[in-house]
Image: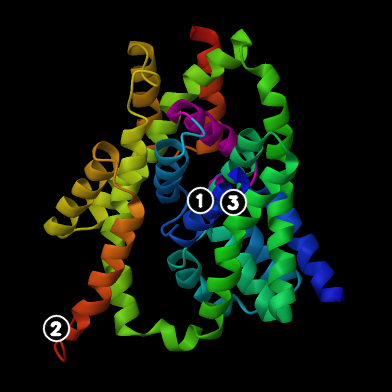
Amino acid sequence: MKNIIQLFLTFFKVGAFTFGSGYAMIPMIEKEVVDRKKWMGKDEFYDQFALATSAPGPFSLNTAVFVGYRVCGWWGSLSAVIGSVLPSFLIILLIAVCLADFRGNTYVEAAFKGLRPAVVAMIAVPFVQMLRRLKKWYFIVLSAAVALSITYAGISPIYFILAGGFTGAILPFFEKGGEK
Amino acid sequence: MIYLQLFLSYLKIGFFGFGGGYAMLSLIQSEIVTRHAWLTGTQLSDIVAVSQMTPGPIAVNCATYVGYSVTGSFWGSMLATTAVCLPPLTLMIIITIFYNRLRSNRTMESILKWLKPMICGMIGAAALMFLNRETFVDWKSIAIFAACFTAIWMKVDSILLIFLAAVAGILIY
């Protein structure tokens, strides 16, 4: 029981003080989980990375589930997830309730006019960087085709996830034995 | 009824949300903007901006916001946020249990390899979706975009940039 409360408090703290992407919170989670609480070793903590990034869902929640499960099983996971979601839930709820009143305010509108192109840049940079890391030309063409068909043909990304997963799952059977 | 739709939409976003926040954004657009028209593209872009300034993952922040604005009640928020947390709570536990067997599995590796271009395409789609006249109203917005693109490329902290962009907006508009 004590551990469950500790998990909740630790992830509440992480959730309340980490801004931006999930990756930004790694050092803080590591400090809490590995150095202070000693719930797991550094190696194990970094091992779960590949896992948390390749599983669907927000990265930070996957980390909370993993750490929680290792410490206290299912209830540990639940407690860590609730802890990490609660701060942003409360803050956004407050903003959602208030933003309705702010809309129409000249300053808020002007600020958003400046923010919108910045948001596009924030998404465009990782896209270009990831595109460059794909290396193989047919993967790059495929990515561009996926981006265009989602945007201009209105096809749901879900189909592309399913198609990609399926292709990846059956291909090893065709290239049996040989090197990858 | 709207509660059920909201729940199912966010469950889908959670379960197919491979590749982190920006890739999930494309799923969110497809469900929330294109399919149900609960938000306009511009409103979603504003939520992303707010989400960068507040703690927590984009998907969770967006679920909380959309849940509230669609139903006008706390329970809508609660429901959408719960839905987005369910996939980590179920799938991730299964993955944790079978971790050692999955780690060096060839099929698993191959699936992840083929998911990568899809995820990349989804991030591209998220950027393209915001490429419109409401985002780029004049040459000043193009200048903000170019400045931010360069700064992020050179690894300037994105939270700092978000605040600068907001200040720039207030000063020039």
Q: Amino acid at mark 1?
A: Ser
- Locate residue A24 relative to residue A10 in the image: left or right: left
Task: Identify which residue is drawn at 43% across, 67% down.
Answer: A54
Judged from the image, the secondary structure of the residue bearing numbered disc 1 is helix
- Which segment is the magenta one? B40-58
Q: Residue most toward the front?
A: B1
Q: Position of residue A166 (x, y in %)?
A: 27, 71
Residues at marks 3 and 2, common chain?
no
Amino acid type assigned to the residue bearing label 2 in the image:
Phe
The crowding category of the residue bearing disc 2, from other C-alpha atoms within 10 Å (few below 14, some 14 to 19, many at least 20), is: few
On screen, residue B133 above or below A48: above
Residue lying farthest to the bottom in this orientation: A177
SS at circle 2: helix
Give the label on residue A105, or none.
Answer: none
Distance Cα–Cα, label 3 vs label 1: 9 Å
Kind of residue at badge 3? Leu
Between A154 and B164, the one lying in front of the other is: A154
Residue A142 colored magenta?
no
Residue B4's tag is 3
Whether label 3 touches label 2, CB < 8 Å:
no
Q: Magenta region's main secondary structure?
A: helix
| Residue, disc 2 | A174
Q: How far apart are the two marked residues, 3 and 2, measured between alpha carbons?
A: 42 Å
